[in-house]
Image (tube, rainbow, N blue to C red):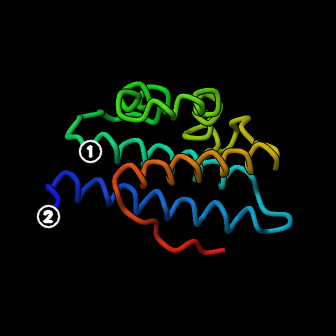
Amino acid sequence: MKKPEQNYALEWLKKAEHDLITARTVLALTDGPTDTPSFHAQQAVEKALKGVLTWHGIAFGKTHDLLALFDQVAEFLPDLARFEASFAAMNDYAVEARYPGDACEPDRIDAMDALEVAEQVVARITQYCGISRAPVYR
């Protein structure tokens, strides 16, 4: 039986999966926007990192900063360090990509790269927590 914080961590991972589904679906559109899937890719990583912290009962405050969250997660998953440059690039997608007037409109390749990173991070964290992933909707 899992501890309450571990059950809550699994809820974070479920939400991360939902963000991945949304990002995949929008990027599958031929002329779909790139800001929305980039935002959801960032959100998937953010929620997965928060899931690890929750799993261990570690408070993380209110932040969208993937690098700050990774700093807290690094002791558990040091192999995610290979994504630090991507986390830095994806930080802009948390807020700037959501509102008009902001200059964050990733090109298609950047959006697809963000989704690929998110897929890998969520998969690794899900594995770390010892659960199988939800079905992939493609």
Residue 75 versus residue 24 in the image, above or below: above
Residue at 67% x, 64% y is 24
The image shows residue 8 at horizontal and vertical percentages of 24, 56
In terms of depth relative to the viewer, which is nearer, 74 or 48? Answer: 74
**Residue 5 in the image, given as x and y percentages of width and height:** 19, 51
According to the picture, the residue beneath numbered tag 1 turns out to be: 54
Can you tell which mark lies on residue 1? 2
| Foreground: disc 1 or disc 2 | 2
Front-lying residue, 85 or 63: 85
Location of residue 56 in the rendering, given as x and y in whole percent from the top left corner: 23, 41
Q: CA distance from mark 1 to mark 2?
A: 16 Å
Residue type indicated by callout 1: Thr
Is there a contact, CB below 8 Å, between mark 1 and mark 2? no
Please indicate whether residue 37 sits to the left or right of residue 4 in the image: right
Q: Amino acid at mark 2?
A: Met
Q: How would you rate the neighbour count of disc 2 (Cα within 10 Å): few for under 14, some for 14-19, many for 20 or more?
A: few
Q: Look at 67% across and 74% down and name the residue there.
A: 138
Q: Position of residue 14 (x, y in %)?
A: 40, 63
Query: What residue appears at the point 59 percent right and 53 percent down from the top-left corner?
Result: 119
The correct choice, above or below, for 133 with respect to 91 in the image is below
